[in-house]
Image (spheres, helix red, strand yellow):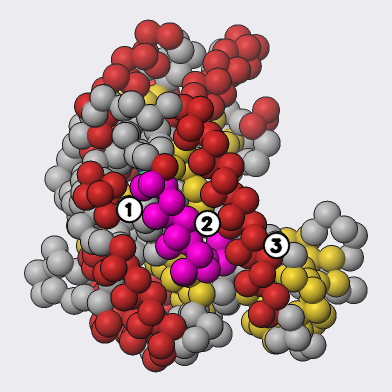
């Protein structure tokens, strides 16, 4: 890798000013984290980073393949770059990430989108210098979507997109093969980072003043199984919790089948861990859960929720739900609404089922109509609106810890997330972005809370 890095550096050093790279990551936090590493590598090779696509010498889309509409959007964006490339023939256009890991996508890009110079999948980080060298030296399209060994790139320094929140991958890949999901096919088998590497990275982030660490993985609570000396996720969490610093810990996403009592106890007992769990339900029907190959039942899921709430009555939950899995009936769907009413999620990320070529579910002859799926989705959103309208009221008059992230649309107002992962808005005369504040909640809306900063 170093050899090609040097070769690229040499080519780029002939230019008067360093060329600029614009990179946009779509999809999940794991992808954002990969994007930060790609920028790290490009910086080492001599590229500068820009947030202005039109002044860039290299544009990279780091793509997501989880649903079809994410892919369609990216095809649209690649299409739009054709004109830019005509105006700037030296522009390098790269497509990477989960979409680029699929052969049929690569074929389509090569055939239809000739403006693309660089295509690389989720395993090719270590190969990036060679690919960039090929494009720069030969002006030919460079493609790499080979599935490499389980090697985790540890020596790449990320160019982080945030200065107070950081994503830290703890494991890569997924072994679960939920029948609807493309992830195990594009990100390979589960492999965990060594605990020492994770702890060192977080220690550094804490020293640099980061206020929130999000541990990342497709199935975080299956962490450690592939290590030579296995360490489970709860042990890892306890060791992270001991690191000095004024930061909180979140993680995304655990799988209900691997959620043990020990895991909930760890969250409850570690002061730095937010008392919020994003626990993907996907469906509230045991029949559909089985067809999805989720390997838990509604009863097992509710046991986790009830246990967490027995330890902390206000324990907060959010979830992912898929509406309209092949041959789902209204009865099945009502099971999902039922779980929503029992758990009272603070937040739901709901998706209409999207058929993904190569998955088991894609082979099912689906008799449920798109019209029904759309109708159910609207019903689900309405039910969740009612739940959160009522449930958010419990926060009125209470004091929450909020990490402020951005300016609101209203001048003089800022918004951030509480430990419960709820959006909170508050007024401030000074810029409070990146700071954690205590906020007394004065008003609950169905999507957010409003309050006054008390210190
Ligand atoms: N269709 C719709 N939603 C999906 N997800 C994953 N695969 C699909 C699919 N084929 C959703 C799941 C997952 C979230 C990240 O995306 O709810 O938890
Ligand atoms: Fe996909 Fe299931 Fe793995 Fe999540 S756990 S990435 S939904 S296969």
Label 3 neighbourhood size at 10 Å, few (<14), some (14-19), many (20+)? some
CA distance for labels 2 and 3: 12 Å
The vertical placement of 204 against 29, above or below, is: below
Q: Which residues are the magenta region?
A: 331-347
Please provide percent x and percent y for residue 234: 28, 80
124 displayed left or right of 320? left
User: Is residue 43 highlighted in magenta?
Assistant: no
The residue located at (39%, 55%) in the rendering is 335
- In this figure, which residue is indicated by the disc labeled 2? 348
Mark 1 vs mark 3: give the one in front: 1
85 displayed left or right of 174? right
The dominant secondary structure in magenta is helix
CA distance for labels 1 and 3: 26 Å
- Position of the N terminus, as image quadrant, is top left
- In this figure, which residue is indicated by the disc labeled 3? 446
Please provide percent x and percent y for residue 424: 71, 69
Label 2 neighbourhood size at 10 Å, few (<14), some (14-19), many (20+)? many
From this viewpoint, is residue 317 visible? yes
User: Is residue 334 highlighted in magenta?
Assistant: yes
Tag 2–tag 3 contact (CB < 8 Å) = no
137 displayed left or right of 82? left
Mark 1 vs mark 2: give the one in front: 1
Find the residue positioned furthest to the front.
Answer: 331
The residue located at (60%, 64%) in the rendering is 387
- In this figure, which residue is indicated by the disc labeled 1? 285
């Amino acid at each position: 890798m170093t050899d090609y890095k040097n070769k690229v550096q040499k080519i780029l050093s002939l230019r008067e000013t360093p060329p600029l790279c614009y990179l946009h990551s779509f999809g999940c936090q794991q992808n954002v984290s990969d994007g930060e590493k790609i920028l790290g590598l490009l910086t080492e090779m001599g590229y500068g980073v820009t947030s202005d696509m039109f002044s860039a010498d290299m544009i990279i889309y780091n793509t997501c393949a989880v649903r079809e509409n994410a892919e369609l959007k990216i095809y649209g964006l690649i299409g739009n770059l054709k004109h830019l490339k005509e105006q700037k023939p030296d522009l390098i256009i790269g497509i990477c990430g989960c979409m680029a890991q699929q052969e049929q996508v690569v074929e389509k890009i090569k055939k239809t989108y000739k403006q693309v110079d660089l295509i690389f999948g989720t395993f090719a980080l270590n190969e990036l210098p060679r690919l960039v060298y090929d494009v720069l030296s030969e002006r030919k399209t460079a493609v790499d979507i080979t599935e490499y060994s389980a090697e985790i790139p540890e020596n790449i320094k990320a160019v982080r997109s945030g200065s107070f929140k950081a994503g830290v991958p703890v494991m890569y890949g997924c072994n679960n093969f939920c029948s609807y999901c493309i992830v195990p096919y594009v990100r390979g088998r589960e492999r965990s980072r060594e605990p020492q590497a994770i702890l060192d990275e977080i220690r550094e982030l804490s020293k640099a003043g980061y206020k929130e660490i999000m541990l990342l993985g497709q199935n975080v609570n299956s962490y450690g199984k592939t290590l030579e000396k296995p360490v489970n996720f709860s042990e890892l969490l306890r060791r992270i919790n001991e690191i000095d610093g004024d930061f909180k810990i979140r993680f995304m996403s655990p799988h209900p089948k691997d959620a043990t009592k020990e895991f909930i106890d760890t969250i409850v007992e570690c002061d730095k861990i937010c008392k919020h769990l994003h626990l993907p339900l996907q469906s509230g029907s045991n029949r559909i859960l089985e067809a999805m190959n989720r390997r838990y039942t509604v009863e097992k899921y509710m046991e986790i929720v009830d246990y967490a709430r027995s330890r902390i009555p206000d324990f907060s939950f959010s979830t992912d739900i898929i509406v309209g899995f092949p041959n789902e009936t209204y009865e099945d769907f009502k099971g999902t609404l039922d779980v929503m009413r029992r758990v009272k999620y603070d937040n739901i990320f709901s998706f209409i089922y999207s058929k993904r070529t190569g998955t088991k579910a894609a082979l099912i002859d689906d008799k449920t109509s798109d019209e029904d799926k759309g109708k159910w989705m609207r019903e689900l959103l309405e039910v969740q609106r009612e739940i959160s309208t009522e449930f958010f009221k419990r926060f009125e008059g209470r004091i929450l810890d909020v990490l402020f992230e951005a300016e609101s649309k209203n001048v003089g107002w800022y918004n951030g997330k509480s430990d419960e992962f709820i959006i909170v808005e508050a007024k401030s005369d000074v810029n409070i972005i990146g700071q954690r504040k205590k906020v007394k909640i004065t008003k609950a809306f169905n999507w957010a809370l409003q309050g006054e900063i008390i210190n």
